Amino acid sequence: MKTVQISLNSIDKVKSFVNTVSQIDSDFDLVSGRYVIDAKSIMGIFSLDLSKPIELNIHAETGVDEILNTLKPYIV
């Protein structure tokens, strides 16, 4: 598992983020305080405080560098 900080500070950024992670065949969790949300759930993301960076847990055995490269526009 790899953890990075991401920023989703606009509605358009949230939409494009969900579209991006939905195309990747791995599991992603967003952690904000005590809440853990499936990163592929747009409704779940909007339940979080998006004014500050959120922790993204990437549950992938292989291809982590490729995934990080794909998610680069969101990484803080």
Image (tube, grey):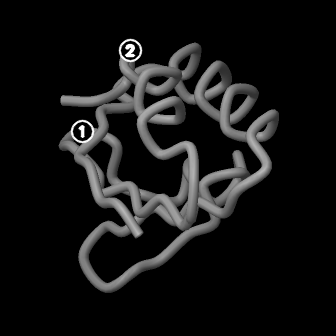
The quarter of the picture where residue 38 lies is: bottom right
Q: Nearer the viewer, mark 1 or mark 2?
A: 2
- Which residue is rendered at x = 31% and y = 67% of the image? 32
- Which residue is rendered at x = 59% and y = 28% of the image? 17
Question: Which quadrant is the C terminus positioned in?
Answer: top left
Residue 11, position as x, y percentages in the image: 55, 22
Q: Which mark, residue 73?
A: 2
How far apart are labels 1 and 2 at the CA level? 17 Å
- Placement of 16 over or under 42, stated as above or below: above
- Which residue is rendered at x = 52% and y = 21% of the image? 70
Q: Which mark, residue 42?
A: none
Q: Decide if residue 35 is on the left or right side of residue 32.
A: right
Where disc 2 sits, the SS reads helix
Residue 55, position as x, y percentages in the image: 29, 57
The quarter of the picture where residue 10 lies is: top left
Where disc 1 sits, the SS reads loop
- Which residue is rendered at x = 33% and y = 53% of the image? 49
Residue 5, position as x, y percentages in the image: 23, 46
Question: Which quadrant is the N terminus positioned in?
Answer: bottom left
Q: Which amino acid, by three-letter code, is at mark 2?
A: Pro
Q: Decide if residue 36 is on the left or right side of residue 7.
A: right
Count neighbours of disc 2 (C-alpha within 10 A) and say few if under 14, some if 14 to 19, many if 20 or more. few
Q: Which mark, residue 51?
A: 1
Residue 4, position as x, y percentages in the image: 26, 49
